[in-house]
C-alpha cells in the first residue's frame, strides 16, 4: 500500500518515509526495492549507463573530517598533466563509454588550468558528455568550464542539515555556499548532481529525511548516494561505516520520487555490498568504472577499500 502510493504520487508523508528507512519489515523493504527496479526499467530502460571516472588530482584546499584526501592528511599529492588526462579520455572512449567524469580535490587554481583541457576534450570528442566534480569554485570558473564545453557537474551536498554539515566540515565550509554553487551551476546550464553520505558520524534518520526533501525540492538530474566508510588518519577514522541496507533503501525511495534521475551504484556502496549489483537492483542505473592511471590511483584514497572492488 505505502509503496503503491509512493509510486503513484512520487511522494509520501514524512512519517511514512521515516518508516521506510527504519522498518524491520523485510516484506515491505523488498516491495520498495522491487518497485524501484520496475520504475527504473520503465523510465530509464534496462541498459546500465557507464561513465568513465578520471580522478585527475588529489590536491585539495579543504579539510573535510571524513575524507582521505583532506588537506592535513599526509598523502603524496598528484595532478595529472593535460596529456595524461587526454590519454585517460582516449581509453574511456575506446571502451565505448560516452561520458568522461573528471573528479578531484577542491583546488581553484588547478580547476582554472583544466579550462583549456576541457576545451581540448570537447574538440576531440564533440559528442561525448563531460562531467566535472571539482568542489566549490568561484562562479567565474564554473562559467569558464561551462563555456569550454563541460555539460554536467557533480557536487554532493553531503547532508542537508546545517548543524550536521558543520560537524562534518571545518568552520570555513558552509552548507549555504554549497547550495549556492548548485544553484549557480544549474543557472549556467549544467546538468547537476547532488547527494549525501549515508551513516556519516552524528547522522540521524531525520537528517536523511531532510536530505530526501532537499533533493526533491531541487530536482537534480543526477543523485549520488554512498555509505560513509572511515579512512585512517582522519578525524572520523574510528567511526563505524554506514549501512549498505539504508543506502539501498534511499536509492529506491529517490528513484520512486524522481523516476527520471540518473543514479549511480556508487563504489562506496559496492565496497560494503560486495559489488555494484545490489544498487542496480534497488533502482540505480549508472556505474562509474575508474580510468585513473594505476600509478596514482592509490593516492586517491577517499576511504578504506576504495580500489579493491
Ligand atoms: N572535491 C570534490 C570531490 C569530492 S570526492 C567535491 O568536493 O565535490 C567525491 C565524494 O566522495 C564526496 O562528495 C564524498 O561524498 C565522498 N567521500 C569522501 N570521503 C568519503 C568517505 N570517507 N566515505 C564515503 N564517501 C566519501
Image: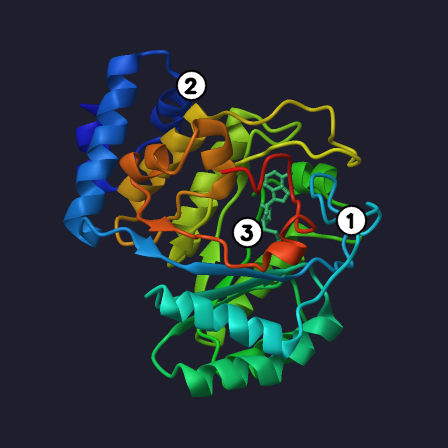
Q: Which residue is mark 3?
A: 156
Q: Quadrant of the N terminus?
A: top left
Label 1 crowd bin: few (<14), some (14–19), many (20+), radius 10 Å: many
Label 3 SS: loop
Q: Which residue is mark 1?
A: 63
Mark 1 and mark 3: span between their CA atoms?
Answer: 16 Å
Residue 278: give x, y in percent of width and height. Answer: 34, 32
Label 2 SS: helix
Checking the image for residue 12, the label placed there is none
Quarter of the rendering containing residue 68: top right
Residue 3: give x, y in percent of width and height. Answer: 22, 28
Residue found at x 56% / y 59%: 292
Label 2 crowd bin: few (<14), some (14–19), many (20+), radius 10 Å: few
Q: Is residue 146 left or right of residue 235?
A: left
**Of the pair 40 and 88, the residue shown nearer to us:** 88
Does mark 3 have its CB less than 8 Å from ligand 1? Answer: yes
Amino acid at each position: 500500500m505505502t509503496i503503491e502510493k509512493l509510486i503513484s504520487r512520487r511522494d509520501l508523508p514524512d512519517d511514512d518515509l521515516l518508516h521506510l528507512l527504519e522498518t524491520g519489515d523485510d516484506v515491505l523493504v523488498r516491495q520498495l526495492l522491487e518497485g524501484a527496479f520496475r520504475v527504473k526499467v520503465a523510465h530509464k530502460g534496462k541498459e546500465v549507463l557507464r561513465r568513465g571516472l578520471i580522478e585527475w588530482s588529489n590536491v585539495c584546499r579543504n579539510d573535510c573530517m571524513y575524507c582521505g584526501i583532506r588537506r592535513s592528511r599526509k598523502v603524496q599529492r598528484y595532478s595529472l598533466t593535460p596529456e595524461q588526462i587526454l590519454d585517460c579520455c582516449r581509453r574511456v572512449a575506446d571502451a565505448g563509454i560516452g561520458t568522461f567524469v573528471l573528479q578531484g580535490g577542491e583546488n581553484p587554481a588547478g580547476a582554472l588550468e583544466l579550462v583549456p583541457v576541457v576545451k581540448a576534450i570537447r574538440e576531440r570528442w564533440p559528442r561525448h558528455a563531460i562531467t566535472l566534480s571539482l568542489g566549490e569554485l568561484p562562479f567565474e570558473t564554473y562559467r569558464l568550464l561551462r563555456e569550454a564545453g563541460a555539460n554536467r557537474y557533480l557536487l554532493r551536498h553531503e547532508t542537508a542539515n546545517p548543524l550536521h554539515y558543520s560537524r562534518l566540515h571545518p568552520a570555513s565550509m558552509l552548507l549555504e555556499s554549497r547550495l549556492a554553487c548548485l544553484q549557480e551551476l544549474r543557472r549556467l546550464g549544467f546538468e547537476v548532481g547532488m547527494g549525501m553520505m549515508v551513516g556519516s558520524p552524528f547522522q540521524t534518520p531525520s537528517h536523511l529525511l531532510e536530505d530526501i526533501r532537499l533533493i526533491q525540492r531541487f530536482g537534480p538530474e543526477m543523485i549520488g548516494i554512498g555509505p560513509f566508510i572511515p579512512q585512517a588518519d582522519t578525524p572520523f577514522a574510528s567511526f563505524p561505516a554506514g549501512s549498505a541496507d539504508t543506502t539501498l533503501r534511499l536509492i529506491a525511495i529517490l528513484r520512486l520520487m524522481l523516476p527520471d534521475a540518473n543514479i549511480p551504484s556508487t563504489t562506496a556502496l559496492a565496497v560494503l555490498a560486495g559489488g555494484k549489483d545490489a544498487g542496480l537492483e534497488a533502482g540505480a542505473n549508472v556505474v562509474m568504472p575508474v580510468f585513473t592511471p594505476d600509478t596514482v590511483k592509490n593516492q586517491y584514497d577517499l576511504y578504506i577499500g576504495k580500489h579493491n572492488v
